[in-house]
Amino acid sequence: MENVDRSKCSLSQETAQLLNQQVGAEGRSSAYYLAMASWCDTQGYKNAAKFLYHHAEEERAHMLKLFHYINDAGGRAIHPEITEVKHDFDSFRQVFELTLVQETKVTQSVHRLVDHCLAVKDFSTFNFLQWFVAEQIEEEVVTRRAVELFDVIGEEGIGRYTIDKAIGALNGGS
Ligand code: OFO
């Protein structure tokens, strides 16, 4: 494929590079949520673990969605290097506070990418990214709800047991 004149493809090198950065952000989310799932699993929060295992798979699917788009549009997708994944957490609550922080960061990075596409008039990539814009709204709603449950239910007594069940019942997005 080296001989293909990719400079004639619609995707600029800069946009491909930014999309690859987004591949990295999604891959990092996937690894992070998998580590969180494992922590919850071994602390007895089985429903939260299931939610996070599922979420980790979703993030990998998001990564692959970008991966295929980059290659289909004439760029080259690069598998990200993912290091220094956090494996230990101070508390059940902290896990979900960190998921919300992570989702907020991913939303900002999607928005920067969309902004770039508008600036360079790459309407194909702009259109492709709308799925991610909508997905991030959904993901922020779900993760914010998970954090709220700690206050709404309270952690005393059987609180954490109840929170675990409630998190298990949350919709993990698509
Ligand atoms: Fe990929 O949606 Fe969250 O990070």
Image (spheres, grey):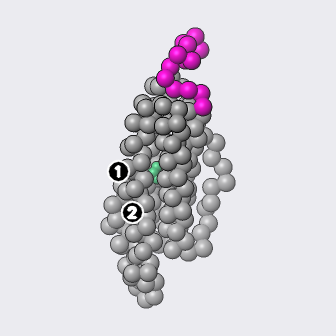
Distance, label 2 to label 1, CA atoms, is: 13 Å
Residue 73: image x %, image y %? 47, 25
Q: How would you rate the neighbour count of disc 1 (Cα within 10 Å): few for under 14, some for 14-19, many for 20 or more? A: few
Where is 52 relative to 162, above or below? above
Q: Amino acid at mark 2?
A: Val
Identify the image quadrant of residue 164: bottom left
Where is 4 relative to 66, above or below? above
Total numbered labels placed on residues in the image: 2
Q: Nearer the viewer, residue 125 or 62?
A: 125
| Left or right side of 89 for 170 | left
Q: Amino acid at mark 1?
A: Ser
Tag 2 secondary structure: helix
Where is 76 relative to 104, above or below? above
Q: How would you rate the neighbour count of disc 2 (Cα within 10 Å): few for under 14, some for 14-19, many for 20 or more? A: some
Give the magenta-colored segment's residue range.
1-14
Residue lying furthest top: 3
Residue lying furthest bottom: 157
Residue 40: image x %, image y %? 50, 67
Which disc is residue 141 wearing? 2
Task: Say whether residue 94 is magenta.
Answer: no
Identify the image quadrant of residue 79: top right
Identify the image quadrant of residue 143: bottom left
Residue 46: image x %, image y %? 42, 68
Which disc is residue 174 wearing? 1
Which disc is residue 128 wearing? none
